[in-house]
Image: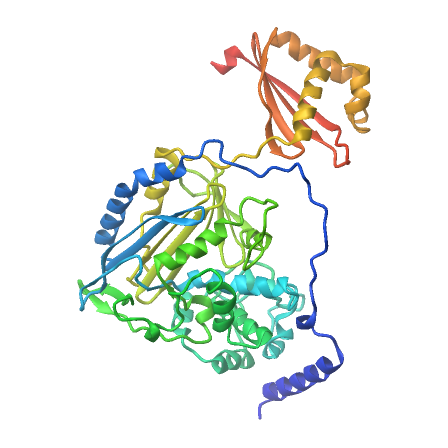
Amino acid sequence: MTIRKQHYILFFLLSLLISCNSPQTAEQKVETPTRLVSKTYRAPIFSIDNRLDKIKSIAPQIHEMIEAHALERKIPGVAYGIVVDNKLEVSAATGLLNINEEIPATTKSAFRIASMSKSFTAMAIIKLRDEGKLSLNDPVEQYIPEMAGLEYLTADAPVIDIENLMTMTAGFPEDNPWGDRQLDESDEMLTDLLMEGVSFSNPPSYKFEYSNTGYALLGNIISRVSGMPYQQYINENILHPLGMKQTYWEFDKIPKEQLAIGYRWEDDQWKLEPMLHDGSYGAMGGLITSIEDFSKYVSFHLSAWPPRSDEDRGPVKRSSIREMHTPQYSGLNAEATDFNGDPCPSVSGYGYGLGIHTNCKGLTLVRHGGALPGFGSNYVFYPAYGIGIMAFGNLTYTSPWPLKKIEKLLFETLELTPRKLPVSNILMERQQQVNQLIQTWNPDLERELIAENFYLDKSREHRMAEVKEIFEEAGAVISTDEIHPYNQLRGSYYIEAENGVIQVYFTLTPEKEAKLQQLYLSFESKEIQK
């Protein structure tokens, strides 16, 4: 027996003894306390909602793009769809899912979606967290004792926790080529890998690096905590509640006429790729599904937005889904381009099984791709727009669509607009008072409106002099625009004047009766505007 295995056995026995005398995280019950909720808050809305009609109008153009892309990339078959809010509104397919049998691809065809499976695994972990059965800050070795014997790169490295696995920051190396071939491996292979020792590329909690192994470990945690195979847990707690009855882990359970066969393009011909069975690494990329089924999952993600007070029907809390969409360890892509290929830097980060990107124009999208031998898939959704798009293909490591061309159609040609936050009651009231203040400086109004810091930060005399100078330069007031809210307690508005435009920005305090804590005015003359 090796020293490493002796160390593991001793640790395992010790952990069993401790568990007999200590309450386990998995046994904790989480009860949602009764909370007060605002009766005046209004969620963001579409001021004019003609999204669906606009999107349906470009369906033929999108189909032409997909067909041309598939022909150019030598993809045998592609299925795709567009979700608007809670429904698959545009969907179609082109080409073949089985070349030898000449079976056409359809929106019911089952494609392996590879790493798009990761967000299902992350969602299962989040659900277990919400139920009090684990914490994202728990060390992974608490659930997988085989992790205790790992040799870290540095003495100051933090112990790997569950959130490290979720956010790809455990320090494991990027393992796409190798990890893709481990899909059907057993649980024993995974634990043996840990006991023999793994190689680190970084200390934990230091940098993002894409890791299939990390998500295989998350699947193992789900199995150990739930007491059932992670596939069964995901089926019972996510897939079935969402009505995803044609989503599978094992390809040999899928009807022949529905199963997409994977290919690679080599020597000017399509060659079959071996279909991998399900196994311990399936948590990182094992799911097989159709556009019609997967659209239900995309709809569920979209349903988490915007934050609101109506019934939360699950199967996972809306706030937890939005948590999945929150980027960690974000980085700047200074070389990014927009739909037209023009420079447009973006900020990107990885959340929980999902990538999040915001470009220079403020467009935020949540996405993930999937690639395994024989398959390539992608999905993207835009929370502020209530729109999600997805495409599956059966060619090795392919991108099944011309995404930038599709995005250009949606956001430039159609000029789709996001939801807008209505003005809160308090912000509307304070705008009227601010507007009166800067033109009259009425002492009674000041006592009602001004926060205690306001004149301490800048004296009343200086504020009045600065504002007076701006109004004298602006000339007679013509009109005052509605306020543009940044949130419930901050906003800006414009005053159109004879010689130009005054911009007024203000923010309120966190007090119950929110008062004016910051005020800033600027003027732009008509000459500058020209």
Snapshot colouring? rainbow
Q: Estimate the x, y position of residue 184 in percent, counting from the top left.
A: 40, 76
Q: Estimate the x, y position of residue 465 in percent, counting from the top left.
A: 74, 13
Which of the 4 image quadrants contains residue 445? top right
Which of the 4 image quadrants contains residue 13? bottom right
311, above or below 109, in the image: above
Q: Which quadrant: the N terminus?
A: bottom right
Position of residue 257 in the picture relative to residue 418 (left or right)? left
Q: Residue at left 45%, top 80%?
A: 186
Instruction: Using the rendered image of the protein, determine whether residue 270 is visible from the camera's viewpoint.
Output: yes
Instruction: Using the rendered image of the protein, determine whether residue 339 is visible from the camera's viewpoint.
Output: no
Nearer to us in this view, 377 or 130: 130
Position of residue 349 in the picture relative to residue 114 (left or right)? right
Which of the 4 image quadrants contains residue 315? bottom right
Q: Residue at left 61%, top 67%?
A: 160
Q: Estimate the x, y position of residue 32 in percent, counting from the top left.
A: 69, 57
Q: Estimate the x, y position of residue 18 in percent, counting from the top left.
A: 73, 81
Nearer to us in this view, 319 or 528: 319
Position of residue 239 in the picture relative to residue 141 (left or right)? left
Nearer to us in this view, 292 or 523: 292
